[in-house]
Amino acid sequence: MSQDLLAEMVQRIGDLERRLDDLAQPEQAGHVQDITVVKGWDGASNKASQTLNLQAAPWSLPASIKGVSVRLYYAAANAGDYGALEMESGDGHMVVAQLQVAGKSDNGSGFVTCDASGDIYFATNNATNTVSLYINAYVI
């Protein structure tokens, strides 16, 4: 085996080791971090529209997150009542659970982009409700 070929193989092995190290870092930008489902609100009652600080309990996610994969369950008294998630108040709903029949429940799931602080916003038109919000994964 020639010295040039051996040197090229060593260089390629080094490049592969660096790539593997990069992939092993969950903090890497754009990395999806699967987590045990975080049940931040699990049948919580009377939740008004509000910013959700995802770095605080009960979620306790890292501050650097860019977005979350969520499942939202919503129940209230009236047809047309809704619970929704968005980046900031007024940005437009990204995940919506809207009741079609009075006294029933609905759910929605999807991806919600976080604001600059790593938070999301919960919006509702009826704070007399029951809400469950589960976070399945986040993107850094």
Image (tube, rainbow, N blue to C red):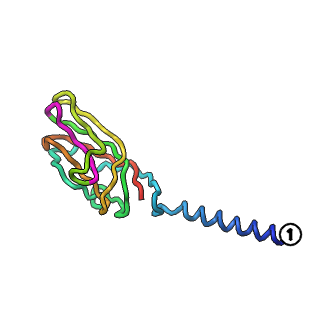
129 above or below 30? above
Q: Is residue 41 visible?
A: no
- In the displayed structure, 41 sits above or below 16; it is above
Q: Measuring 25% from the left and 50% from the top, which residue is drawn there?
A: 91
Residue 35, position as x, y percentages in the image: 42, 52
User: In the rendering, at what x and y percent does residue 60 appear?
Assistant: 32, 59
Q: Is residue 68 above or below residue 62?
A: above
Q: Residue furthest top?
A: 101
Residue identifier under label 1? 2
Query: What residue range appears in magenta?
Result: 77-87
- Using residue 16 as the reference point, say whether residue 102 is left or right of it: left
> Could you tell me the amino acid type at mark 1?
Ser
Crowd around label 1: few <14 · some 14–19 · many ≥20 (10 Å)? few
Q: Position of residue 137 (x, y in %)?
A: 40, 51
Residue 83 forms part of the magenta stretch: yes
Residue sitting at 60 percent across and 63 percent down? 19
Residue 130 figure quarter:
top left
Residue that protrudes farthest toward the front in the picture = 91
The secondary structure type at the circle numbered 1 is loop
Q: Quadrant of the C terminus?
A: bottom left
Between residues 5 and 59, which one lies in front from this camera angle?
5
* Of 26 and 5, the residue lying toward us: 5
Q: From the image, which quarter does the N terminus lie in?
A: bottom right
Place residue 15 in its image quadrant.
Answer: bottom right
Q: Is residue 111 left or right of residue 20?
A: left
Spot occupied by residue 135 in the image (x, y as percentages of width and height)? 35, 49
Q: Residue drawn 30% across and 45% down? A: 94
**Most distant residue in the right direction:** 1
